[in-house]
Structure formats: structure tokens, C-alpha cells
Image (cartoon, coloured by chain):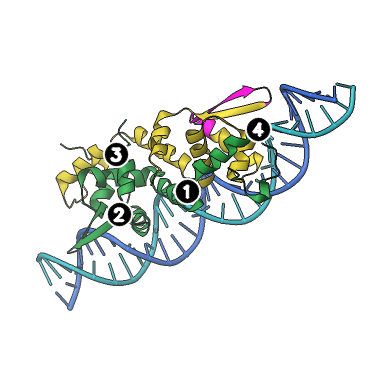
Chain colours: A yellow, B green, C blue, D cyan
DNA sequence: TCCATACCTGCGCAGGTAAGCAGCTATGCA
DNA sequence: TGCATAGCTGCTTACCTGCGCAGGTATGGA
């Protein structure tokens, strides 16, 4: 196992073999960035409140989310736009009301974890 | 169930009862902030790489982490300081080498989730 | 004693991000 | 047709955050 890239192969290591294990453990950089972005979406209390509300009570309208979270409407709308762009939530239009729900299964899994 | 705070009790709702459900689903603001901060620590690719390496291969020295992740030493040190201040990792000194490991069980649970 | 190594810290820069405000579009009702 | 409501967008401001550089501390060996 010589997983250390050439540009840093000459650096001294403390536990050489464990460095290779660590590189294998980290895995692909793209997958890493994907997960980091996922966590980033949950890293804001307001967005997390929106997602928990949607995940646990089902589809909700924008203005109801604003009342439930204490945010004002544009803030909710902007947060939902971000989450929608990331494919985490999806909105369904009924008349002039849009009801959102969580559609990303990985994020749903993370939300299940917030039950301490 | 009238969980809507007084300062926004006069706002019009779309589905009044579901707003109350949503407020119950969101839960305590402090717990919410705690989870948001946890997610925030995992929201950086470099920190996530460090945590995955530590979680999956066990205790590792700072300079080995730098080689494995491609970061330079001060960046690793700063990231570990942040994680240590949050109680996520802990370091043990052996001579002039410090080996870190993940000690927060909630974060360990989240790291287990990154296996898609 | 001198030096190399392992790690830590402070500082400044660049880039990203959330919050609030004003204003816009679209739907439904009288 | 006129109007109120639901939701969206653009803009500005202030703030936060990650990174690299330079330098400092502590341990161990020559």
C-alpha cells in the first residue's frame, strides 16, 4: 500500500502504514465534498428547524413555516430555495400555496439522528 | 395545542393545527443550536477528512494527518483545536507526538452515516 | 549545548454567507 | 376590474470562516 501522492511522498511520517490506512479511510475527494455540503445545509439553526418541521410533520406551506420557526417570509423562501437547489426539498404548488417536503433520503437519515 | 408564541399569534395560517405540530417537531431551541453546531463541524471537507481518518483508523499524529489529507501542519492543528474545543476529539501526548481520536459519540454516529 | 522535529499560535487576507429591506409576480375573491 | 394574499427575488451590509505565512514552545537526539 503506497497511497501517499507523489507530491508529499518525501515527507517524514510517524506511523507510515497508518497514513496509508487513513488515506484509504478518507476515500474519494468528491464523495467527501458531497457529504460536507450536506452537513453544511444542516449547519444553520433556521434551516435545521425548517427541515425538522418538514420531516416530522409532513408537507407545510411557506408562511406556516415562517410562523412555526419565527422567521420572516423572505428568509424562509431563501432558505427553501437553497435547499431546493441542493435537491433536499421539493415544493408542490396548490393554488397560491406551495407545500414543501424533504425528498433527499440521506438527509432524512441524518434528521432521524437528531433525537437525543 | 396553542403553541404559537404571542408575538406571532395574530398571523394568518394556512393549516393552523399543522403549525402547532411543526412547533412541537422543532423542539427546544437550545437542542437545535447544539445539533446545528455539530453539523457545522462536519461541514468542511478538510475537517470531515480528518474526522473520517481518525474514526476509521484510530489515533493518529498531527503530521500524519497532514500528509494523509494534503493539508499543511498549521491548518491541521487549527482544525483540531476547533474540534477539541467543541469536545469532538481529544489528544494524547506521547513524547513530542500528539495522537488524536474522536470522543463524541453523536459525531461518531454521524460519521458512520457517511458510507454511501 | 546545539539543533531538528512535532506541534501550536497570532495575524491578515480573501471568499463566502446570513439577515433585513424593498419591491416584484401570481393566484383567488368580491 | 380592483385588491389582498402567498411566495419569490435582488440588493446591501455585516459578519464569519478557512487558509497561509511567520514565528513561538517543547521534546529528543547528536
Residue count near mark 3 (Cα–Cα under 10 Å), binned few <14, some 14–19, many ≥20: few
**Distance in Å between CA atoms under marks 4 and 1:** 25 Å
Left or right: residue B96 compared with residue B9: left
Callouts 3 and 1 on one subunit = yes
Q: Is residue A89 magenta?
A: yes
Q: Which residue is mark 1?
A: B32
Q: Disc 4 designates what residue?
A: B14
Taking B69 as reference, is A96 above or below it?
above
Element at label 4: loop
Mark in front: 2 vs 1: 1
Name the residue tied to disc 2: B89
Q: Which residue is mark 3?
A: B112
How far separated are the C-alphas under marks 2 and 4?
Answer: 45 Å
Q: Nearer the viewer, mark 4 or mark 3?
A: 4
Q: What residue is drawn where x is 59% and y is 28%?
A: A99
Q: Earlier in the sequence, mark 4 or mark 1?
A: 4
Q: Earlier in the sequence, mark 2 or mark 3?
A: 2
Amino acid at each position: 500500500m503506497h497511497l501517499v501522492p507523489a507530491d508529499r511522498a518525501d515527507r517524514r511520517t510517524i506511523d507510515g502504514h497508518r497514513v496509508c490506512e487513513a488515506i484509504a479511510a478518507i476515500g474519494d475527494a468528491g464523495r467527501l465534498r458531497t457529504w460536507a455540503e450536506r452537513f453544511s445545509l444542516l449547519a444553520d439553526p433556521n434551516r435545521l428547524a425548517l427541515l425538522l418541521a418538514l420531516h416530522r410533520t409532513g408537507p407545510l406551506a411557506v408562511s406556516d413555516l415562517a410562523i412555526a420557526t419565527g422567521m420572516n417570509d423572505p428568509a424562509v423562501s431563501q432558505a427553501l430555495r437553497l435547499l431546493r437547489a441542493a435537491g433536499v426539498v421539493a415544493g408542490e404548488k396548490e393554488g397560491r400555496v406551495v407545500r414543501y417536503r424533504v425528498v433527499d433520503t440521506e438527509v432524512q437519515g441524518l434528521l432521524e439522528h437528531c433525537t437525543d
